[in-house]
Image (cartoon, coloured by chain):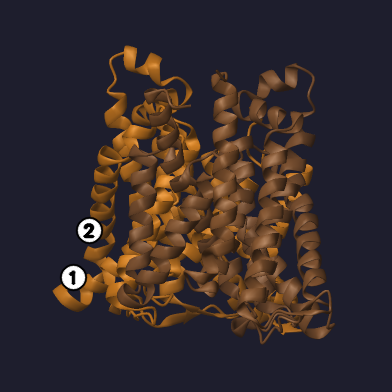
Amino acid sequence: MEIFGVSLQGLAGQLLIGLINGSFYAVLSLGLAVIFGQLNIINFAHGALYMMGAFLAWIGLTHFGINYWAALLLVPLLIGLLGIVIERALLRWLYQLDHLYGLLLTFGLALIIEGLFRYYFGISGESYEAPEALRGGVDLGFMFLPLYRGWVVVASLVVCLATWFIIERTKLGAYLRAGTENPKLVQALGINVPLMITLTYGFGVALAGFAGVLAAPILQVNPLMGSNLIIVVFAVVVIGGMGSILGSIVTGLGLGLVEALTRVVYPEASAVVIFVIMVIVLLVRPAGLFGREN
Amino acid sequence: MARPADRSQRLRWVGFGLLLVAGIVAPFVAYPTFLMKLLCFALFACAFNLLLGFTGLLSFGHAAFFGGAGYVCGYVVKHWGVTPELGVLAGTAVAALLGFAFGALAIRRSGIYFAMITLALAQMVYFLALQLPFTGGEDGLQGVPRGHLFGLIDLSDNLAMYYFVFALFVAGFALILRTIHSPFGQVLKAIRENEPRTLSLGYDVDRYKLLAFVISAGLAGMAGATKTLVFQLASLTDVHWHTSGEVVLMTLLGGLGTAMGPVVGAGIIVTLQNELADKVGSWVSVIMGIIFIVCVLAFRRGIVGEIRALAKRLGIS
């Protein structure tokens, strides 16, 4: 059976890749949205921290014998700690200023992190082997599903939904949402808003680190892997709008799939299709699909 | 006794006069190629400053105009055999058109979204430059001839080329000065300071923003097209987002919203890159990042802004 001149198997394979890319878009844009909600800063360093997550996993395995599963837990913690340091040392001086300064400062951070990794590891890239339990795959009848790829999609979705649950359904999430609306009032009610902001940033970048570890066995671990991705994620954020958590997840996954379909139908356009969609969304619905006009 | 305003005006013109003389004798003191690179980036940064410093719009995609115009200029000069001044004109025109399209889209959102949209649109231009058949992919457009200015003056001579670049820079810089001191420029500053208020005073804010964007993009294109002629190369580096970041840094370091700031900032960054690139390699990126952070945290007025503030405190101007 053929669709668009590609076998069903090939199409399913492409869609799976799209779903994986979409999972990364979702996790990263979710982190950006969570950070933006509390700090009003667009974290340009997000891509660099994602790259760092992948590298830490690789360094952990090759130099310290830390296996994948431990890395999946440890690396986000480390990145989160780094995020807390960044927030306390640098970002907190900027809250009274124009939001643009936050973008510029995190851009500077991204340059530093990327430059350091390029210096120590070159740009050729390292490969990271998937853990033993997730090697191989299963035959689904219409396609062969490599286990690790399936795992990436499931793990990302679980993390995304857990984040959604925490923010929308728990008391902590209620504080966060209230802090987004009116930080002064929340502080007056006796909640430690600065601490909440610090932890939010830590959590947001930990998500990026987590995505980095997930990506390590699929993609080449490479100092430039983050910056190329983050620009696409920015477009995803513009398309989805940062108003809603579920919106970010749906937009991320959806755009991953659209990108994969484009790769099947008209491969030359696959690199730009998300930007084209961004243009269309800006023309039709400037606030983004799930955004609120303010 | 002259009034202080007159005096500061006069001081400024004396300053510009001195700089003009410095620009004319410079190629006898320093390497013309280095100076030409510096002038191209200085014009690029001045064009960018018109948008960020005077209108308050942060475009993170100006490399698209700079590098895109470079490709257009390189292509028409190399393959159609047009004279260099027409090549620069073509690059400028295409960049202004592109600026119109990007600007019209980006001003639909403001603040942080504006920056992200321009960045994403510029990335699209980057991918086009990578994939389109006429750009030479990874290699870029190589061997662009400098040609004869107006069909007469041979620009392969570095000194002749330098004065061509210098003339273009002066023209671009004068246009920017004229713009920021015109009533139009005053409205731009009003938008920067308080957009809702400007709107309520009856100004069509979006039109002003768009026009500022187009002028800025066009001049950035002029700088990029000139750079292509100088180095006889249109490359992917010039459309890469790193270049967009560099121009932000130059402007920030020199002084947002000052006429001379971007020139100073471009001078420092280009010199740094020239001095450091072969010695420390990837550390250039780290150093630029550190300068970025220091500027944002402690030095938001930039060098010229600080000097101006100091002069004001000492009562010089």
Image coords of residue A71 (percent x, y)? 25, 64
Q: In the rendered image of this protein, which colour is used for chain B?
A: brown
Q: Nearer the viewer, residue A286 or B170?
A: B170
Looking at the picture, which amino acid does disc 2 mark? Leu
**Quadrant assignment, res B3:** top right
Cα–Cα span, label 1 and label 2 = 9 Å
Residue where numbered disc 2 is placed: A74
Q: Considering only order in the chain, which callout, 2 or 1, is on the residue closer to the N terminus? A: 1
State the residue lying farthest toward the bottom.
B143
What is the secondary structure assignment of the residue under circle 2?
helix
Q: Which residue is mark 1?
A: A66
Q: Nearer the viewer, residue A192 or B45?
A: B45
Residue A194 visible to an observer of this rendering: yes
Q: Residue furthest left?
A: A64
| Residue at x-position 55% and y-position 71% | B237
Q: Secondary structure at mark 1?
A: loop
Query: Is residue A265 rendered to the left or right of residue B286?
Result: right
* Crowdedness near tag 2: few (<14), some (14–19) or many (≥20) residues, C-alpha within 10 Å: many
**Which quadrant: the N terminus of chain B?**
top right
Q: On what subunit does the disc labeled 2 rest?
A: A
User: According to the colouring, which chain is orange?
Assistant: A
